[in-house]
Amino acid sequence: MYQNIVNFIKELYGQDNVPLSVPKFIGNEKKYLNMCIDTTFVSSVGKFVDRFENDMAVYTGAKRAVVCVSGTNALHMAMMLAGVEREDEVLTQALTFIATCNAISYIGAHPVFIDVDKHTMGLSPDAVKAWLAEYGEVRNGQCYNKKTGRRVKACVPMHTFGHPVRIEELAAICEEWSLELVEDAAESIGSKYKGKHTGLFGKVGVLSFNGNKTITTGGGGMLLFNDEELAALAKHLTTQAKIPHRWEFRHDHIGYNYRMPNINAALGCAQLEHLDEYIADKRSTATAYAEFFKHIEDVQFFTEPEHCFSNYWLNAVILKDHEAQQNFLQETNDHGVMTRPIWELMSRLPMFEHCQHDKLENTIFFADRVVNIPSSVRIADVQS
Ligand SMILES: *Cc1c(COP(=O)(O)O)cnc(C)c1O
């Protein structure tokens, strides 16, 4: 039934077995890695760490960027920097990768799941506003949940598959309700809302450089800041909170060993040199998909929202119903085209099923219908 789609994707990629999303190394990766080994700077000290942070700050327009070992621990750090504490609540999406909720849980805080928008697949300002109108109450400059009595400290939208949410509206709501805005921009490197890079609209933004993301450092993450002082605190906390000194070991805080090693940063520097090329390539793939699916009944290709520039990290189609989604997954995977459903909703997982949520109407609509289709960069490999 979906044979024409399978054929189209194989032709697009010129492959008989098409993976979902694999990394691409066509630049200085080997050269920079060799420099690390030749100089012995493979670990927690080295020039690639500073360079990667500086290059990324320039690329995104952040005041400062701080690298971490993974996107997940960058999110954990972001929660701490936002002042989230044990037994606080954090408004977020049920339609996200588990890392968002794990980071909230590491603090001992509780996620509250709010619906997403039809046009972004990310947190809906309308739904957040409606939830706050029903349950929110601001006392002494702090927001509380009238139902649980707990403090609602932060709001964490996620830019699903690289498509920016309506972030300006969310920022305004957070301002009005005294919530800290933390963006999970793990999937949206290079994606912009009204020309401004995602991750820069709130207190802190988080990127990921995991192997399946748009560019990779093997494993890695990053914090983006508009605030120099907060960035300096992040740097301090992610490096064991050691007071700088040539030989003394003194620490002034419970710190974390969250610093990205130099070899991973070296990979990141090389990858970043080709990021814009990768994004242009991914956008051309998305254009080809959009054109093709225009003529396919009952399969809708998801395109970037209004006012947005999307990196199209993972392409997504929306099937007619849950049964069609399952059939599509079966048939494509059986025939060498790797596809996968959108994540199981956080609100359905045993760790989070007790958490408060709204009706999650659009969330459930997407969970039943969305499938990700192959999205790797198509630029030819250079042989060395
Ligand atoms: C990839 C990702 C992360 C971070 O994952 P790491 O593998 O720890 O780098 C966080 N949130 C979302 C939504 C992601 O897709």
Image (cartoon, helix red, strand yellow):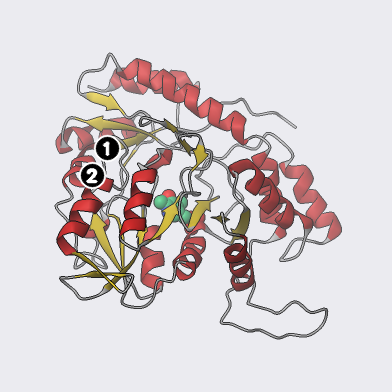
Amino acid of disc 2: Ala
Q: Which mark is residue 370?
A: 1
Q: Is residue 250 left or right of residue 15?
A: right
- Depicted 198 relative to depicted 333: above or below: below
Identify which residue is drawn at 18% across, 32% down: 324
Are the two marked residues, 2 and 1, in contact with CB atoms closer than 8 angstroms?
Answer: yes
Mark 2 element type: helix
Q: Which of these two is toward me, 328 or 268?
A: 268
Amino acid of disc 1: Val
Give the CA separation, mark 2 to mark 1: 6 Å
Q: Is residue 204 left or right of residue 45?
A: left
Q: Could you tell me residue 122's position as x and y percent? A: 32, 44
Quadrant the C terminus occupies:
top right
Quadrant the N terminus occupies:
top left
Q: Could you tell me residue 321's position as x and y percent? A: 15, 34
- Depicted 110 relative to depicted 359: above or below: below
Can I make out residue 7 in this image?
no
Mark 2 lies on residue: 367
Furthest residue in direction front, as rendered: 140
Mark 1 element type: strand
Q: Which of these two is toward me, 311 or 125?
A: 125
Mark 2 surroundings: few (<14), some (14-19) or many (≥20) residues within 10 A:
many
Identify which residue is drawn at 23% across, 44% down: 367
- Depicted 284 relative to depicted 353: above or below: above
Identify which residue is drawn at 59% across, 52% down: 218
Can I make out residue 383 in this image?
yes
Identify which residue is drawn at 25% across, 62% down: 112
Mark 1 surroundings: few (<14), some (14-19) or many (≥20) residues within 10 A:
many
Q: Which mark is residue 305?
A: none
Q: Quadrant of residue 273?
A: top right
Q: Could you tell me residue 180's position as x and y percent? A: 40, 62
